[in-house]
Image (cartoon, rainbow, N blue to C red):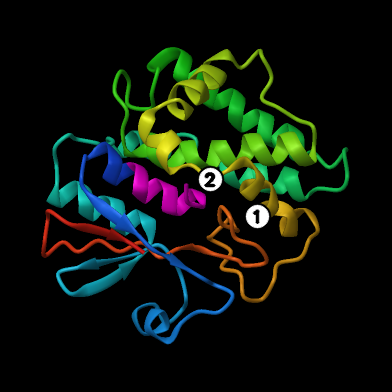
Amino acid sequence: MFVTGPFTQRVLLTIEEKHLPYDIKLVDLANKPDWFLKISPEGKVPIIKLEEQWVPDSDVITQTIEEKYPEPSLATPPEKASIGSKIFSTFIGFLKSKDPGDGTEQTLLSELTSFNSYLKDNGPFINGATISAADLSLAPKLYHMEIALGHYKNWSVPDSLSHVKNYMKTIFSMDSFVKTRALKEDVIAGWRPKVMDFWPANLDSRCISLGKANATAVMVTHLTTINMSNPKQFFIL
């Protein structure tokens, strides 16, 4: 078992759904090694190696994988690519909120209700009958939302939003998702600084999940690299 934040898990899900082989290596973001800073000067992850060039950003990574390995297709029509995209930011707003009456919960519920209506008319997935890149981007964020809000707010998606709940249940049970998801306790630990309204200076805000199975007092995450020059071998760092 290894730890992933939602952005790294998105990349791993893409690779898993494409049935491409890869290896994994962890990088300690609390003590970034020199070799890592050379390929990622800003210290950001995930990052991939594409034809001898290191490229960060999960948007670019997943798009490039789709272009180079189009089958099975995960392409999402442009008009559907932003469906559900506001849920993550509204979740964070609600999680950080200390005022029950500030409207952050209702804002999140509004986004989830809109997504529920969309799935009712167009689902079960964002692109209809088959899973696509948009789902692989959104699902890890919903996973973190479910765990973090359940732990820190004793909150869960209302039963009335049945299409959202079924969507989450379906994707969360996929083999690729189970294989790449973070442990519940690591998600809880990773979001604790947000709840405390304090982020350690050495924590990349894009890497949500901290910790590692059987590791203590160490913040780790994944530096994701894919060696496209050798399509038979993918490396996840």
Position above or below: 157 against 14: above
Residues at marks 2 and 1 touching, judged by CB atoms closer than 8 Å = yes
Q: Position of residue 108 (x, y in %)?
A: 67, 35
Instruction: Tell me which segment is drawn in magenta.
Output: 1-13
Residue 9 lies within the magenta run:
yes
Residue 85 visible from this viewpoint: no
Neighbours of disc 2 within 10 Å: few (<14), some (14-19), many (20+):
many
Q: Position of residue 56 (x, y in %)?
A: 35, 67
Residue 3 lies within the magenta run:
yes
Of residues 129 and 10, the one nearer the viewer is: 10
Position of residue 119 in the picture relative to residue 96 (left or right): left
Q: Secondary structure at mark 2?
A: loop
Q: Earlier in the sequence, mark 2 or mark 1?
A: 2
- The amino acid type found where label 1 is placed reads Gly
Residue at screen point 30% across, 18% down: 129
Marks 2 and 1, how far apart in space? Answer: 10 Å
Labelled disc at residue 237: none
Of residues 142 and 210, the one nearer the viewer is: 210
Q: Position of residue 118 (x, y in %)?
A: 47, 21
Residue at screen point 21% across, 51% down: 65
Q: Main secondary structure of the magenta part?
A: helix
Which quarter of the figure has residue 79?
Answer: top left
Q: For mark 1, what is the residue?
A: 190
Of residues 80 and 190, the one nearer the viewer is: 190
Position of residue 216 in the picture relative to residue 170 (left or right): right
Which quarter of the figure has residue 157?
Answer: top right
Q: For mark 2, what is the residue?
A: 182
